[in-house]
Image: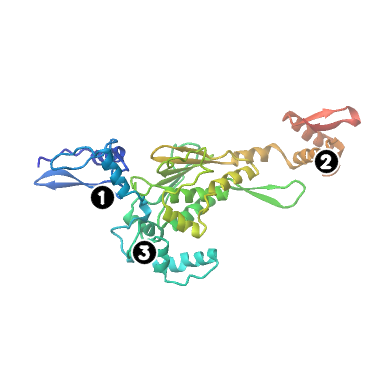
Amino acid sequence: MIGVTIGKNTIEELANYIKRNTDPQIYPSIKIEEVKNKKIILIEISESREKPVFFKNHAYKRVGRTSPELKSAEIRKLAKETGEKVYWDEQICREARLDDIDWNFVRTNFIPLYEKVCGKKVEGKPLDLLKSSGCIKKDKPTNAGILLFGKEPQTFFKNSYIALARYPGKEVFGEKLDYKEFTGNLFQQIDSCNNYIVEHTTLMSRLIPGEVRRTDIPEYGRFSVRELITNAICHRDYSDQGSKIIIKIFKDKIEFYNIGGLPKGITPENITSKQYSRNPTIAKVLAKVEYIEELGEGWDKIIKEHKEHPLKPKLPDIKSDSDTTLVVLFSTKEKFEEEKYILNERQKYILEKIKYQGFIKSIDIQKKFEITRETANRDINYLITLNLLKRGGIGRSTKYILK
């Protein structure tokens, strides 16, 4: 044993090299150890459930001291023998025990919600419910079981949490206004993160012309925010613990960064028409208690909410590569400010009246609001400068219509 020189980024570069060149991707455990005062690298790789694993588009086998390539017939045979896909969240969490499940959360939080949504009482034991949901196998928690119901999921999967940063401007610049990490099980992460975003984004109010009541307008669609948090939780690649879900709140947008690109066949263009789940067990459990849309209708509802929003926000932007997905929600606050300060209540009334009867006269405005002719004409002229109205006729027969 001659030892190796360990640089600052040796471990990270080696892990990325292995991950980048294997298919299905391999996530090794890499450690530095000393043997007789010499540093060595210890790489541990668990057996893959999918076989064969390709390295740089080639598959190999070990024969004595050699590593010849697998022949096509051998590849087909291996693929046939292990053809049933085993998802990461379905696999047993090897280090976990039943004691690592938060049974109090299951009994006092999950089961009451489950019964409320399903409309029927759970007759069996909590253990049986989790077994039937794929969260426990062979009396051991699965990866999904630990993430959904574990006492401390981050003990087993250190980066399975949401990191949120809030900035004062439109870009990452200067001091953050706030930084939060939402940990715990997946239900707790979704609820805590959603509550924070609702509390720290604007709820705007405006008067309905001619009415006393006000209408509240959220800066971001409430369903869209919660659905994107849940989507990130549900569809992230948990087998890659190199990073975490990241949310950035800016003055004009919210950015949702997730680990794992869009699955094969799913694109930003067809995301509303195609359905895929990277973690089917997690998705199934979340759907049972209506945290996500079971039929994959979440994106349809996000688009619908945007189109029905009073201020017509820009539709979400989706970008994805092989490793990450970015979704951007756009704020409506600037549109509200424009609307709020450009038109006062009299000016809004003028436009509504013309839409209703086709025209308006200055005297109509004076009588309606009990104002002078000069004030009414000031409002009219302002709308003309905005290119919204035009004048017809002269003298007392002057009328104003929409341009």
Tell me the quarter of the picture where residue 73 sits: top left
Gap between marks 1 and 3 measured at Cα = 26 Å
The type of residue carrying mark 1 is Glu
Name the mark on residue 47: 1
Q: Is residue 322 visible?
A: yes
**Which residue, given by chain and number where applicable, does mark 2 sit on?**
371
Q: Is residue 119 above or below residue 10?
A: below
Where's the C terminus, which quadrant? top right
Q: Residue at x 50, y 67 (%)?
A: 112
Mark positioned earlier in the residue sequence (1 or 2): 1
Q: Residue at x 80, y 36 (%)?
A: 375
Q: Element type at marker 3?
A: loop
Q: Badge 2, how many Cα within 10 Å: few under 14, some, many 20+?
A: few
Extreme residue in the front direction: 73
Q: How many labels sit on residues?
A: 3
Q: Is residue 128 above or below residue 185?
A: below
The type of residue carrying mark 2 is Ile
Gap between marks 1 and 2 measured at Cα = 83 Å
Marks 1, 2: nearer the viewer: 1
Relative depth, front residue between 136 and 51: 51
